[in-house]
Image (cartoon, grey):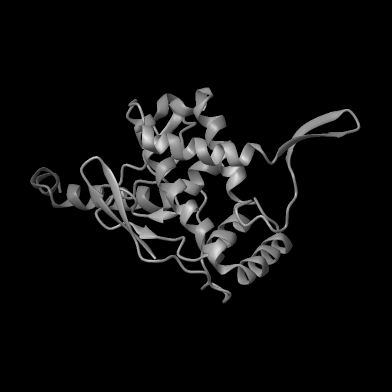
Amino acid sequence: MLTFYWAFGGYTSISEGLEVSAEKSANREWKLVGGELCLDFANTADWHASDSPHEQLRTYEDLVDWAIHSGILDKASGEQLLLEAARHPSAARGVLKRAVTLRESLYRIFVAAVAAQTPDAANLNILNEELARALRRLRLTCDCSRWAWDWKEDDRALDSMLWPVVRSAADVLTSHKHAKVGQCADDRGCGWLFLDLSKNRSRRWCAMEDCGNRAKVLRHYRLARSPSFKRKV
């Protein structure tokens, strides 16, 4: 388990040994609202900007489950990785710990981008370390006349789901997209990130049906209780 505590300037973490589970996770609905793979990965902690973030990546199976849901892995590849994790639980715990560390670094980097600030060097170093690992697996492929980037297949690579994540982060940060990253304005500390493609960058919520709807209901409630509203009624 990895628990995060909010302190001035960012999160600190206390590791108590991340788990590897061969059992099926409880039915989990992964919400992909980020608009980019790296932002969806950064959103794998609920209430990320609150005093009590809730960790969603508690086991290596959670990490694989998220990767399948986000389209990085197909079900067969995910099952193969779980078998490999069962054979090498210590290595799987190491990958899970790296994944959570990477997730926190990406979150802080993108929060800094939202505020038009320079990210902390330590977080950038973590991203660059994972990027170096991933790029060693990247290759060019050609299908007739169509060239494309692809990943060197390795069913035993327990960290394979991290490669597309860090490449996605590098692509966003080195393009015009980094200026369009937004953060949910929910006052409880949702903190989820998203790519704001709205006109004039007017998007405020991770999803209108979640935090946006709550804000709308709360606004109507406060309006209904206001003295001016009562006088009009």
Q: Work out whether residue 34 can be spotted.
A: no
Residue 84, located in which quarter of the rendered image? bottom right
Counting from the top left corner in percent of width and height, residue 45 is at 40, 55
Q: Work out whether residue 81 can be spotted.
A: yes
| Residue at the spot 54% in from the left edge and 24% down from the top edge | 175
Residue 206, located in which quarter of the rendered image? top left
- Counting labels gives 0
Position of residue 44 in the picture relative to residue 114 (left or right): right
Q: Is residue 142 above or below residue 7?
A: above
Q: Is residue 44 above or below residue 130?
A: below
Position of residue 81 in the picture relative to residue 221 (left or right): right
Toward the bottom, the furthest residue is 23
Counting from the top left corner in percent of width and height, residue 33 is at 49, 47
Residue situated in front as seen by the camera: 139 or 211? 139
In the picture, which quadrant includes the N terminus?
bottom left
Position of residue 202 in the picture relative to residue 158 (left or right): left
| Residue at the spot 64% in from the left edge and 36% down from the top edge | 135
Counting from the top left corner in percent of width and height, residue 9 is at 24, 40
Residue situated in front as seen by the camera: 217 or 49? 49
Q: Is residue 231 above or below residue 29?
A: above
| Residue at the spot 36% in from the left edge and 36% down from the top edge | 111
Counting from the top left corner in percent of width and height, residue 142 is at 85, 33
| Residue at the spot 56% in from the left edge and 61% down from the top edge | 91
Residue situated in front as seen by the camera: 168 or 210? 168
